[in-house]
């Protein structure tokens, strides 16, 4: 896709509700991430999605590094360059090194059992839309049921978001 199908709103286009939604994401130069500028075109959807999005990003029980592995592998599997770019930055801030990121991208073993389990979890969910019996068993041996469900719903949330971003053609920000 050469141009976004749904370009992010420009600051001059914002109504009061959109400006209020974008305010926490806006830097001192008045820029906000393209994902939010695009989603702000449908505020009813943003209002409905925001609670779930906040939960999957910050409110669930997942270890933040393992959450990022789930999101990153999901991004690769659904072809969401935007999600990969944004969440690789988050993963690095959480201490994930480039070698681990490349293993997650390739779907190859990292040597960390929990990271590798999250890769398998994302692969099962995106590929077969369910956890395989071996992955289900391994997840439930390593974590409690609430943690497992948080992992499943995180992959589901980022699959839906990534599909929307891919369909809208949301571009990676150029000036970071």
Image: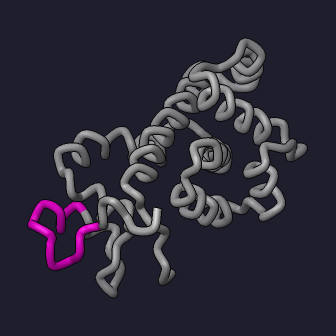
Q: Look at the image and name its color scheme.
A: one colour
Q: Position of residue 101 (x, y in %)?
A: 75, 57
x and y, in percent, of residue 8 in the image: 30, 67
Q: Is residue 40 left or right of residue 32?
A: left
Task: Please report the bounds of the magenta region as a residue range.
Answer: 8-21
Q: Is residue 150 above or below residue 19?
A: above
Q: Is residue 123 above or below residue 4?
A: above
Residue placed farthest to the right in the image? 111
**Quarter of the figure with residue 170:** bottom left
- Residue 108 drawn at (x, y percent): 84, 44
What residue is drawn where x is 73% and y is 59%?
A: 96
Q: Residue at x 18, y 68 (%)?
A: 19
Locate residue 167, reporting x and y percent.
Answer: 40, 49
The quadrant in which residue 45 appears is: top left
Indicate the quadrant where residue 78 lies: top right
Q: Residue at x 29, y 55 (%)?
A: 39
Total numbered circles: 0
Q: Is residue 163 magenta?
A: no
Q: Nearer the viewer, residue 62 or 137?
A: 137
Which secondary structure is most common in the magenta stretch? helix
Residue furthest to the left: 16
């Amino acid at each position: 896709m050469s141009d976004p199908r749904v370009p992010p709103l420009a600051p001059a286009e914002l109504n009061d509700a959109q400006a209020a939604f974008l305010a926490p994401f806006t830097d001192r130069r008045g820029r906000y991430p393209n994902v939010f500028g695009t989603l702000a075109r449908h505020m009813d959807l943003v209002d409905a999605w925001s609670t779930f999005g906040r939960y999957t990003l910050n409110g669930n029980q997942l270890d933040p590094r393992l959450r990022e592995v789930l999101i990153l592998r999901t991004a690769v599997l659904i072809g969401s360059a935007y999600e990969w770019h944004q969440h690789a930055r988050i993963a690095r801030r959480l201490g994930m090194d480039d070698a681990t990121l490349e293993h997650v991208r390739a779907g190859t073993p990292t040597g960390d059992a929990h990271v590798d389990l999250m890769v398998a979890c994302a692969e099962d969910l995106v590929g077969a839309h369910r956890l395989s019996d071996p992955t289900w068993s391994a997840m439930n041996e390593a974590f409690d049921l609430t943690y497992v469900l948080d992992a499943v719903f995180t992959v589901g949330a980022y699959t839906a978001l990534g599909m929307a971003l891919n369909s809208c053609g949301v571009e990676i920000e150029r000036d970071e």
